[in-house]
Amino acid sequence: VNQEQFEVTGWAVQDNGRMPDVIEVQLADSRTVVTTFTREARPAVQSRLNLPHPLYGFRICLPIPPGVQPARVRDLVKVRGGRDVNSLSAPFRDDPIKPKA
């Protein structure tokens, strides 16, 4: 996060084993639907969930909306994903993936 933009990183996998095609980032009253984002390897996710490949990570950089203090971004951001804007999930959790026991 800087004074003008913020970055959202994470991972997501749908019930069908695929990564969402659409990610929505909500920051305060501003919602941005993102269909093009950087995909990143998440080998721990692949291993823990027995997935066919590691590319379930994402990285999105967006401008901070007017009126939002940069220090509050982490507390205010919510991220959801789905096949399209009509099938978005509940907000993603922000807890880390736990290794296999």
Image: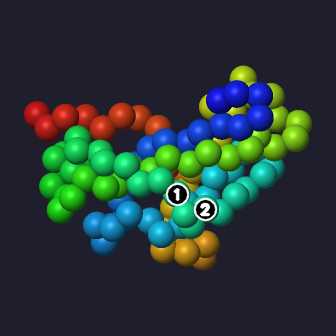
List the single residue furthest toward the left: 101
User: What residue is shown at x 15% (from left), y 55% (from top)?
Assistant: 50
Give the left or right position of residue 49, taking residue 26 as reference: left
* Residue 20 seen: yes
**Callout 2 secondary element:** strand
**Callout 1 secondary element:** loop
75 or 19: which is nearer to us? Answer: 19
User: What residue is shown at x 25% (from left), y 35% (from top)?
Assistant: 98
Q: In the rendering, at what x and y percent does residue 44 appear?
A: 23, 41
Residue kind at label 1, given as amino acid type: Phe
Q: Quadrant where the C terminus lies?
A: top left
Q: Exactly how many numbered labels are in the figure? A: 2
Would you name the residue on which mark 1 appears? 37
Residue kind at label 2, given as amino acid type: Val
Give the left or right position of residue 53, taking residue 33 as reference: left
Residue 34: image tag: 2
Q: Are marks 1 and 2 in contact (CB under 8 Å)?
A: yes
Q: In the rendering, at what x and y percent does residue 19 appear?
A: 38, 63
Q: In the rendering, at what x and y percent does residue 10 appear?
A: 44, 44
* Above-or-below relation of 94 to 30: above
User: What residue is shown at x 72% (from left), y 23% (from top)?
Assistant: 71
* Residue 76 seen: no
